[in-house]
Image (spheres, rainbow, N blue to C red):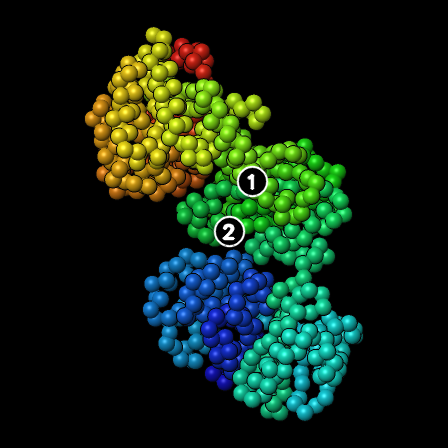
Amino acid sequence: MADDGMKRANSGGPAPLFVLSFRHRDELTRIAEAAGWQPIAARRTLNAESRFVASGASVAVIDARGALDEGLEAARALADPVEANAAALLVLVSRNDGAALDQFHADGATHFLVSPFSDRQFVQAVQFAERHAERVGGGQRERRAQGVDTGRRASWRWQPGSPDVELSPLLARRMGLGGEEAQRITLMELFRKLDPDGRRAARGAIDRVITTGQPTAFAHADGAGARVAHHLRIEGEAGGVLGVTETIQPRFSSALPARDPMTGLRDGRALRVWVQEQLDMKAEPTLLLLAVSRFDAINAAFGRATGDTALQAAARRIERIVAADAKSRFVARVAGAQFAIALSAPAGLEEGRFLAGQLVEALARPFMCGDHVITLGSRAGVVACEAGDDAAALLRRASAALAEAKAAEAGPIRVLKIGAQGESALGNRLEIDLRKALDQDEIEILFQPQVSITSGRIIGVEALARWQHPDLGELGAVTLFSVAERSDYVTQLSDHVQRKAITAAAHWPQALANLRLSVNITAADIVRPGFAAQFLELVQESAFDRGRLTVEVTESGLIEDLNAAAHLLASLREGGLRVAIDDFGTGYSSLAYLKALPLDYLKIDKRLSEDITGSPRDRVVVRSVIDMARSLGLGVIAEGVETQEQLDLLAQEGCTVYQGFLCSPPVGLNELMGLVAARPGR
């Protein structure tokens, strides 16, 4: 073990090793240092990503012994920067936590070690991890190691008994002493540059390292608002103290921006600082939040590496379109697959809307990731600055706009005009307005055709609610039921929509007499006592043919109470109705309830219909769903079909009925009659 350490020390300085240990930091620091590494050790996850990147280490060690939850959180935080820097991630776990290794692996760990283990076994595990990083990163590891010689780092040396401290050139420059040579100041001068808490921590750490000979550390705030750690160890036979400094919580400003290690874009903290600086200058920025979709499916189908490559490619495409500069435009990755673009005045909502359209269109074009062609989708929310906004308020309203864009059935972009409120802020008003709309019968029913793929004939329709709000315009079923759920009014809304749809269909003209009608029932309906009897009575009163009526229930509604769902659906089928699962593929998609429930149809969610034009693996997923449904004796209806290419591929895989904008959006009675007449079949 000593020989290994000598080899590292003679190769241009000890190689850095990043260690995050919640219970055993000092112990691991001692072992690593004795083996010849320069440990950069921490006890908390705070800023772990940026600290790891700044360390230049080729291996990150996460010690989850006795702190499993914290260890898993740290692994998720470090996985992206570790992979982006061609490094390795070694996790240490307690024997009783061995079952968590699968989760660590899923979160990005490359190596593991289960306690109890000896010092030598830990060193060997790190060496194996180093070898992995060297092979993955080629010459990167060697360049990183050469760049972290303590002579080139912000470090200081002090010989006990001496009044002076020697500062490395880098630390001297940071302290404003200038020059390219090492500088000397007195120990008291060094202490005076620390805050009172920092001085106490420094004296305690120096006493510990001298008394025990074991590495230790202390931290303090500097005058610029950053937080700095000093990693101490005994150096050489003379017993000198070496302190290597590390900024663990940097001061963020537009002059020193924080970077996202995965994409190289600015991060969320830097965005908030930039926005606040614009507000302080009365620049009134416009903010665009963009969410890129389908990464979970890509990771599952092709692996995390392909997903990360697609995310990085998306970031580059966003950068090219935005053409950011420090003064007028700012681009950041704020979380996961979510990006922010801030525009300073005089840019406003119209420029923000136009840019959002450009980005959504650009991200819809395929990406080439290795051997795979990846298609992505995106949604955007755009807001402008209002009087009294701070950065947090502007971001909250942008998040509300993005949430509405994700929920919207039409259009991927939601723009909140100045003075407008997000859906969450409009909640109270909409609840009151919805009650009035129900009382005054203002909720309309539209019908979206369901088309036989083989004949091209319209064979049925799904009833969908629409509300023409006097101020907000047309609101769809998603918004309607969301508002109703918040106000505990969902039962009344569900009854209203079901009754109005069935009554309208019962009075259809002869030209529509053969169409099937599908109506939705909610999770709240499933658990209502006596709902099946009430619903069948409604159908009986309307005189609508039960054999032409299908009830649709979403996966989420089934999962909430599977036994209640099975009992209800059985009662409805016994009453002569047919039953379908709606939006299949968005929830748990459990084979157990597909086999257990009395079903007639399975409706493929629109996202699966979109996926079928993606990679061959996407088609395999859709094909499997269709084959599974047919093997269970279920009919298959594909929702959200918008292109002829989607329809052709769905037909090839055995789907028999489709619904979507390729045929028609939801329409009223007169438009429906025209569509039926125009599609007599073939």
Q: Earlier in the sequence, mark 2 or mark 1?
A: 2
Q: Nearer the viewer, residue 484 or 226?
A: 484
Q: Secondary structure at mark 2?
A: helix
Disc number for residue 621: none
Q: Is residue 95 left or right of residue 325?
A: left
Q: Quadrant of the C terminus?
A: top left
> In 3D space, how far apart are the residues under numbered discs 2 and 1 (Cα atoms)?
27 Å
Q: Position of residue 321 (x, y in %)?
A: 65, 40
Packing grade of label 2 (10 A; few <14, some 14-19, many >=20) is many
Q: Quadrant of residue 151?
A: bottom right
Going by the image, does 139 lie left or right of 120?
A: right
Residue under circle 2?
Answer: 308
Where is residue 51, by image quadrant? bottom right
Amino acid at circle 2: Asp
Could you tell me if residue 233 is visible in this image?
A: yes
- Residue furthest left as drawn: 574
Q: Is residue 308 above or below residue 653?
A: below
Q: Amino acid at mark 1?
A: Ala
Of 540 and 229, which appears nearest the observer? 540
State whether residue 245 is above or below residue 590.
below
In the image, taking residue 25 as reference, residue 573 lies left or right, namely left
The residue wearing badge 1 is 400
Which quadrant holds residue 599?
top left
Q: Is residue 648 above or below residue 425?
A: above
Task: Give the foreground label among 2 and 1.
Answer: 1
- The structure residue drawn at horizontal position 34% and vertical position 29%, both measured from the top left corner, is 521
